[in-house]
Image: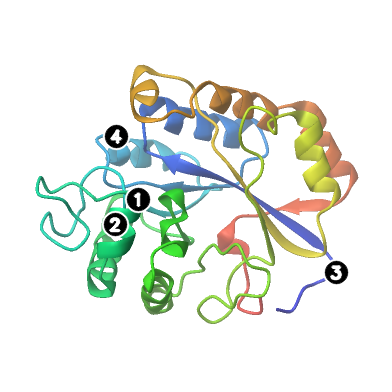
Amino acid sequence: MNKSSSKQLIINADDFGLTPGASAGILYAHRHGILTSTTAMVNTAFSKQSLTEAKSYPDLGIGLHFVLDAGRPIFSHNSSLTDHRGHFLKGRSLIDAAKTWDIKDELKAQLELLHEWYGNVTHIDSHHHMHLHIPDALEAVIEVAERYQLPVRTFSETAVIGKGRTTDYFHYDFYGEENVSVAYLLAIFSNIKPGTTEVMCHPAFLDAWLRRVSSYDFTRMKELEILVDNKVQEWLNDHSIHLIHYGGLHHGH
């Protein structure tokens, strides 16, 4: 990858549309803090309304949080991805059963729904990083991403995703009670190298739905507090780190 001498940073919140509180927290972190990007789940009861609200924030990049292991699919309730009730399989059952063609069909269905409900889609990642855990899933995702000309999140600094359009670096460790602090986030920022880096986050306002569907709950509010902290914003300004979203990636990455 051709890394420029400048430092560009994408702060991406996963789980947009998971619950009203999750979506509201993400929009708040964008409006009042350093969050530049989010990825939307489109198979939840709250996703369509959340995406309607997001249209009020045109500078927020929105990609697809491709769901393969939570709730029900969009394309088919009877495939290698589902159980007898039509819900997504989970864990090892999903990893062992998933077929490439079913992954492609589901990804295209979710992408097209996001296009319909929101419009411009900036990139693709996946819930629980399942596109990196299921055999052949990454190949399927790359094929669809190339067709739609979208970047894909990767963990590897050496991976070439699609036509090479991804970030140079990715940090997923701003997560969990011990690592969610201003000091820890600034330590991540201090080690950012020239090129483009994504830092993943999960801010939210806590609501009853989130308590039911996610064991990662209270710490999301702590993440939100840090993402809107003036000290964090001032540090980025002082160190000339440029905030972008995936729509700002160039084909040369």
The answer to the question of whether label 2 and label 3 lie on touching residues, with beta carbons closer than 8 A, is no
The residue closer to the viewer here, 81 or 232, is 81
Circle 1/circle 2 CB separation < 8 Å? yes
User: For the residue carrying disc 1, how many other residues have a C-alpha within 10 Å: few (<14), some (14-19), or many (20+)?
Assistant: few
Quadrant location of the N terminus in the rendered image: bottom right
Q: Earlier in the sequence, mark 4 or mark 1?
A: 4
Q: Quadrant of residue 184?
A: top right
Q: Mark 3: few, some, or many residues within 10 Å (few <14, many ≥20)?
A: few
Q: Nearer the viewer, residue 24 or 124?
A: 124
Q: In this rendering, which labeled residue sits more in front, label 1 or label 3?
A: 1
**Residue 231 image position (x, y, % from top left):** 82, 29
| Comparing labels 2 and 3, the label whose residue is closer to the camera | 2
Q: Are marks 4 and 2 in contact (CB under 8 Å)?
A: no
- For label 4, the residue is 46
- The residue at 28%/70% (across/down) is 104
Labels 1 & 3 near each other (Cβ < 8 A): no
The label shown at residue 91 is: 1
The residue wearing badge 3 is: 5
- Find residue 55 and report its horizontal and vertical position in percent: 42, 43
Instruction: Relative to 160, say whether 125 is above or below.
Output: above
Identify the residue shown where x is 36% and y is 74%: 140
Type of residue at label 3? Answer: Ser
Query: Residue drawn 83% across and 41% down?
Result: 187
Q: Of callouts 4 and 2, which one flags the residue occurring earlier in the amino acid sequence?
A: 4
Give, as a three-letter code, the residue at label 2.
Leu
The x, y position of residue 165, in whole percent, is: 58, 74
Q: Which residue is mark 2?
A: 94
